[in-house]
Image: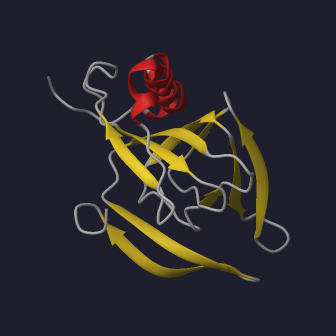
Amino acid sequence: MTSHALTKPHLHTQLRTVVDGILAERAQWLPTVQFDAAQRWYRRVDTSHLGDALDVEAWILSWLPGQGTGLHDHGGASGAFAVVTGTLHEHSARTGLSGPPRLLTSSRTSGQLRAFGSHHLHDVVNVGSEPAVSVHVYSPTITTMTRYRWTRRGAVVTAVERAGADW
């Protein structure tokens, strides 16, 4: 089989299909999820049987109260994530033609799925009192991830991480 990137017109639909496939198998992987007070726990998921050799990668993440990602991008990859248990808040960077850039906050609860494009900047955090679990899918696979801090003028780069070296 030949790997190929997801086609742009159907990108979000294809990402959602892979997320739905992983969620349909939750009885197999949910009991293996771990929670780590020192750092967020994550595990890569094999999706070869779900994506017809699509260029995707998928992760299961756990979140204890207070744990978050920090503001970051996905190195040009588009993505989708679904909350499996608990509640997560997503702080998304928005830049418009008028007005200053701003962070918008959305609450994502169990069963909700969020798809996003290749230029998306966000911070995901568990602000609740209960642990949370989520599934994340990206295409193409992530090779770099840029971290940011938020200022009045918008996002400022603080670090660039590389797959295989930093995660």
Q: Quadrant of residue 49?
A: top left
Q: Position of residue 137 (x, y in %)?
A: 44, 38
Percent position of residue 120, x then y:
58, 55
Is 75 left, or right, of 154 in this rendering? left
The residue shown at (52%, 80%) is 157
Where is residue 156 shown, x and y percent of the image?
58, 81
Residue located at (44% from left, 29% from top): 31
Quadrant position of the C terminus in the picture:
bottom left
For the residue pair 66 and 56, the one nearer the viewer reads as 66
Image check: 2 left or right of 47? left
Q: Quadrant of the N terminus?
A: top left
**Which one is nearer the viewer's eye here, 30 or 111?**
30
User: Does residue 140 lie above or below 40 as drawn?
Assistant: above
Describe residue 30's horizontal placement relative to residue 50 as left or right: right
Q: Residue at x 26, y 33 (%)?
A: 4
Total numbered badges shown on the rendered structure: 0
Q: Residue furthest right?
A: 99
- 16 vs 86, nearest the viewer: 86
- Colour style of the rendered protein structure: secondary structure
- Relative to 160, is 76 above or below? above
Determine whether, in the image, residue 45 is placed left or right of residue 95: left
Q: Quadrant of residue 134?
A: top right
Residue 17, above or below 61: above
| Image-quadrant location for residue 121 | bottom right
Residue located farthest toward the left when viewing the structure as drawn: 1
At 56% from the left and 51% from the top, the residue drawn is: 63
Percent coordinates x, y for residue 89 in the rendering: 72, 52
